[in-house]
Amino acid sequence: MSGDPSQPETVGLSHLFALRSALARIGATLDEATTCDELAREAARHMRGTAAVLRPADEAGPRYTAVSGDPATLPGARWAAAESPERTDLEGRDALSSSGDTRPTLCVAIATGSDSYGALVCTRDAQPFTRLDVEVCKLLAERAASHIRQAREHEQVGSLVGKLQSALLAEPGRPHPNLDIAIRYLPAGQSAMVGGDWCETVRLHFGRTLLVVGDVMGHGLEAAVDMTAYRSALRYTAAADLPPHRVLRQLDGIASGEPDRRPATCLIARVDPAREQVDLASAGHLPPAVIDAEGTASLLPVRVGPPLGTGLGGYQSQTHHLGHSQTLVLFTDGLVERRNEDIDQSLRRLAELTFTAATDPEQLLDTMLSALDTAHAEDDIAVLAARMRPRTAKTDDTLR
């Protein structure tokens, strides 16, 4: 019938579809080892034999990885390394036979552009490899090389971001000596990626300390950059020793004047040990918790204004008693929020926790993080715990 494909054309289309499916199965992740496994598996299937990735020589010499099939059929790794092409554009060295072995061996470079990641080595029992086999293996190897390059670039970026994270999440400023402080940063999923959650402490006059937690909307490097901007602005503004609500007003004005700045929530607590009180102001942030001497948790009410960066203002300070036996805990929403759970329920779960009496801030945070199963948190976490130290003659001197 006119228009019906011939048998050779049908076979060719079948091979093309199979090859396209094989290419799609290579590079499913950003993990280099997984990509090598996928490459060897697809090559072994298409060549109907054994396939492996030959890694470049290191201190231990060349070696095979990601073997799919019978490893005993592979030629010696040193021989294959000496004979394998380093580039995909070298002709005449793709189909090779192992010295002293009649088993056909095919080696093609795993390379893209100027980057080479080793070689794909295939063997089978008797049938020699054809030029079509060579080209198929080249396509598979080139696809794998492209994804290996992406995996390595991703790893490099992750390493740089990890270093950036250490710099961005530098230790907060120096609190007053009359406070014991504990701080935890936990990226979502325990990854190395930096986010927009942060804590800060600023030492003020007359023995007071400004405690701050903030959460920039979004994740990743862009959120981290905005986080540093908020943090820098806070340090500058706090130097004027303003009450918490006026600090928020200043931060909101600065952020709203920069259209590319992401909004952020923020909670500021000014702790005054001499008066045993804390002044709170919130920009769209969750309230802090207080752990009393018996280990009972509760939430301090705080008037909530709009997030920073909106330009709406309207922040207010609220004063609460804070005794020397109480521990104040400021946190970002990743500590308590869980998928498909109302935030009020999440906060109740925190308020229902109990702690060992007289536990110091470090131990208290360890207990809290464990009890709330933060290892499986779905968002970044920043949490700060502060307790006033018992007053002594030396402490009274530092208040002056």
Image (cartoon, rainbow, N blue to C red):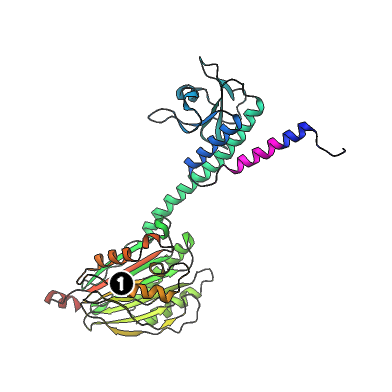
Q: What type of secondary structure mainly makes up the magenta span?
A: helix
**Image coords of residue 313 (percent x, y):** 46, 82
Q: Is residue 114 visible?
A: no
Residue at x-position 43% and y-position 66%: 227
* The residue positioned farthest toward the top in the image shown: 100
**Image coords of residue 187 (percent x, y):** 40, 60
Q: Quick check: 169 left or right of 49?
A: left
Pick the front one: 33 or 230: 33
**Image coords of residue 125 (percent x, y):** 56, 22
Where 84 sits versus 320, above or below? Answer: above
Pick the front one: 16 or 333: 16
Pick the front one: 15 or 62: 15
Pick the front one: 214 or 173: 214
Residue at x-position 47% and y-position 62%: 219
Q: Secondary structure at mark 1?
A: loop
* The residue positioned farthest toward the left in the image shown: 393
Q: Is residue 269 visible?
A: yes
The answer to which quarter of the image holds residue 301 is bottom left
The residue identified by callout 1 is: 353
Residue 321 lies in magenta, yes or no? Answer: no
Q: Image quadrant for the N terminus? A: top right
Q: Quick check: 93 left or right of 177?
A: right
Residue at x-position 13% and y-position 74%: 394
The answer to which quarter of the image holds residue 9 is top right
Which region is colored magenta? 14-29
* The residue positioned farthest toward the front in the image shown: 1
Q: Image quadrant for the C terminus? A: bottom left
**Image coords of residue 307 (percent x, y):** 46, 76
What amino acid type should be assigned to the residue bearing mark 1?
Leu
